[in-house]
Amino acid sequence: MYDEVDEELSQMYEEDERAVKVLDSSTFRKPIKHLRVRKALQVPPGMSVADVVQLMNEKRLGCVLVTENEKLTGIFTERDVLKKVVGKLDMAKATVKDAMTPNPESFQQDDSIAFVLNAMHVGGYRHVPIVDEKKRPVAVISIKDIVAFILDNFPEDVLNLPPKPMRKTEQREGA
């Protein structure tokens, strides 16, 4: 008798654990402080582009934040290297101020994930700075951080996929 009750309870708990997760608007209304982000690497505006690019390569970063007097003044990204530096500037002589995106759109830790994600989509940004109330950099959010957040919410749905996708052929065999 007790074994039957224990088995029934066990099945109920397992069903609760397998409850369908939904990625809905409430998930994205959470503040961005729920994301796993990395601390922003900060550089001064007078640093050479060559040194900044070398630093980005060493640290495997897609961007750095440019600061003066501890305040955000710009962002320098891989795109800036491609669009503003390659074939246009002497990397050894140019400073990061010459190639950065000045006064980038920035966000605070209590802004919602949806708000930041929308701004990234509309602006075409892959990286956005997070600042405190005094405009001092706190972190950088990247598209990879958003993807990681989604994976954290649905690990079994994404990480348990077969190594190769299952595809149907549109043609009949022998056709």
Image (cartoon, rainbow, N blue to C red):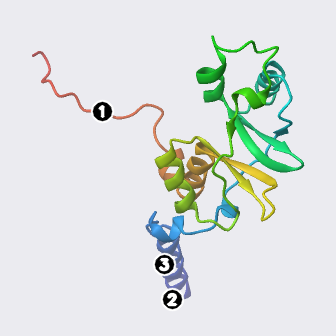
Q: Position of residue 115 (x, y in %)?
A: 54, 61
Q: Nearer the viewer, residue 86 or 112?
A: 86
Tell me the amino acid under the disc marked 2. Met
Please give the residue where the numbered disc 1 appears in the rendered image.
167
Q: Position of residue 34 (x, y in %)?
A: 67, 63
Q: What residue sits 81% from the left and 25% below the top?
A: 58
Q: Nearer the viewer, residue 35 or 3?
A: 35
Tell me the amino acid under the disc marked 3. Met
Q: Which mark is residue 1?
A: 2
Crowd class of label 1 (few under 14; some 14 to 19; many from 20; radius 10 Å): few
What secondary structure is marked by label 2? Answer: loop
Q: Which of pointers 3 and 1 lies earlier in the amino acid sequence?
A: 3
Q: Nearer the viewer, residue 65 or 126?
A: 65
Quarter of the figure with the C terminus: top left
Q: Which of pointers 2 and 3 lies earlier in the amino acid sequence?
A: 2
Please give the residue where the numbered disc 3 appears in the rendered image.
12
> Outermost residue, left direction?
175
Q: Nearer the viewer, residue 76 or 174?
A: 76
Q: Is residue 6 above or below residue 100?
A: below
